[in-house]
Amino acid sequence: MKEMHRTLLVAALLASSVASVMAAPATKPKPLQEGAPYAEQRQRIIDDLQKGDVYSEIKADGRASVLAALERIDAKLVNGERANLSEADKVAVFNDQELVNTVLTQAREDSRLICKRERVVGSNMPQSVCITVAERRRARESSTDALRSLQTLPSKAGTP
């Protein structure tokens, strides 16, 4: 009896660990990673910024700050090596790398397309409607603002 409880407990633990691993969201790698060749990563970032697919929702100031940070990193990494840098330069490169990763990761998440099957007004046929996360957020904020402005209008029901 005790052995059966132990077997059931082990099976339950294994099932819960497998379920948690399967439910864990897949994390995308950071745009700039330690140990990977900097020149290749830099080129991929610039290509993705120019294409506009991966980072379609990046704002102009975000794009400018990423490009400026990449230029500062380029100036510090003369030969593409970090080992020859002073401690102050290593800190500066690390801070610029974190800035690039933060701005681009947020832009990548905002640029992610979400598609839903929705019924368009006047039709019973559902259609796929695909918009970015940022567009969905802007639409939600716009409708909330419109509703709030309607609620603050003075009531004209009691006036002749």
Image (spheres, rainbow, N blue to C red):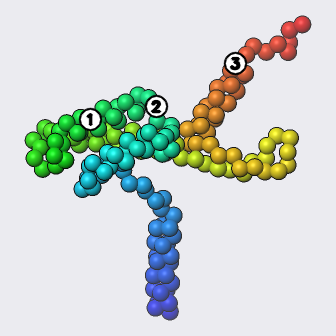
Q: Position of residue 111 (x, y in %)?
A: 52, 43
- Could you tell me the amino acid type at mark 3? Thr
- Could you tell me the amino acid type at mark 1? Glu
Q: Which of 126 and 74 is in front in this view?
A: 74
Circle 2 is placed at which residue position?
A: 59
Circle 3 is placed at which residue position?
A: 152
Q: Are marks 1 and 3 in contact (CB under 8 Å)?
A: no
Image point (42%, 55%), residue name: 28
- Could you tell me the amino acid type at mark 2? Lys
Image point (64%, 26%), residue name: 145
Image point (39%, 38%), residue name: 103
For marks 1 and 2, the one nearer the N-term is: 2
What is the distance, in whole Å, between disc 1 and disc 2 at their CAs? 18 Å
Image point (45%, 86%), residue name: 6
For marks 1 and 3, the one nearer the N-term is: 1
The local crowd at label 3, few if under 14, some if 14 to 19, many if 20 or more residues have their Cα within 10 Å, is few
Q: Which tag is nearer the camera, tag 2 or tag 3?
A: 2
Q: Which tag is nearer the camera, tag 1 or tag 2?
A: 1
Q: Do the residues labelled 1 and 2 touch (CB within 8 Å)?
A: no
